[in-house]
Amino acid sequence: MKYKVTNNFLNTNHNFLLSLNAKINTIRIMQPAEAYILNQEAPYKTILLHLQVLIEHTLPDLELRYKYKIPFYYYKEKPFCYLNVNLKKHYVDVGFWKGKAIQTHKSHHTIENRKQIISLRYTNLESINATILIDILNAAVALY
């Protein structure tokens, strides 16, 4: 049996391969911190994306890196805060490197036997209070 390859078939497959190649290249250049966020399951992915938007909109001078196997924001080349998913306890942690010095909204801080870091914990998108997070971000950046 002979198969006839038409121009339409070639064009369709060529376009598909170009599209596939573009997606592969996008994945290759995706930063590990971004991959960490995008590879999370719901609801953690949604929470992380929302937190990322709030953090980067509030403090555009932060640099997102991938340290300690989690997304970590740096300010002036120093650790600032991180995003961590705890699958066992079902929350997303926003940890602040100089957290103990932050006096804003102390009733929302989670410390758990840590000497310097405090965190804000979120179990769902609705639990994120943007005003509190932004206030704490601004208080934290003032420490640098």
Image: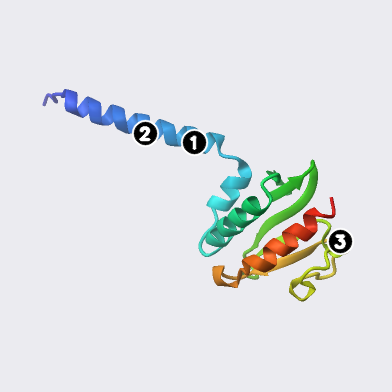
- Vertically, is 89 above or below 14? below
| Quadrant in which residue 49 is drawn | bottom right
Cα separation, mark 1 vs mark 3, equals 37 Å
Q: What percent of the width, then of the height, locates residue 67? A: 73, 46
18 is higher (above) or lower (below) than 76: above
Q: CA distance from mark 2 to mark 3?
A: 47 Å
The answer to which of marks 1 and 2 sits earlier in the sequence is 2
The three-letter amino acid code for the residue at tag 3 is: Gln
Residue at 55% x, 34% y is: 29
Q: CA distance from mark 1 to mark 2?
A: 11 Å
Q: Which mark is residue 26?
A: 1
The circle drawn on residue 19 is: 2
Colouring chosen for the image of the structure:
rainbow
* Pointer 3 local density, CA inside 10 Å: few below 14, some 14–19, many at least 20: few
- Position of the N terminus, as image quadrant, is top left
Q: Earlier in the sequence, mark 2 or mark 3?
A: 2
Comparing 2 with 119, the one in front is: 119
Which label belongs to residue 116?
Answer: 3
Q: Secondary structure at mark 1?
A: helix
User: Where is residue 131 drawn, in percent x and y?
Assistant: 65, 67
Amino acid type, residue under disc 1 in the picture: Thr
Pick whichever of labels 1 and 3 is earlier in the sequence.
Answer: 1
Tell me if residue 96 can be seen. no
Q: Are marks 1 and 2 in contact (CB under 8 Å)?
A: no
Q: Quadrant of residue 55?
A: bottom right
On the image, the x and y values in percent for residue 44 come to: 56, 62
At 83% from the left and 68% from the top, the residue drawn is: 103
* Place of residue 27 in the rendered image (x, y in percent of width and height, measured from the top left): 51, 38
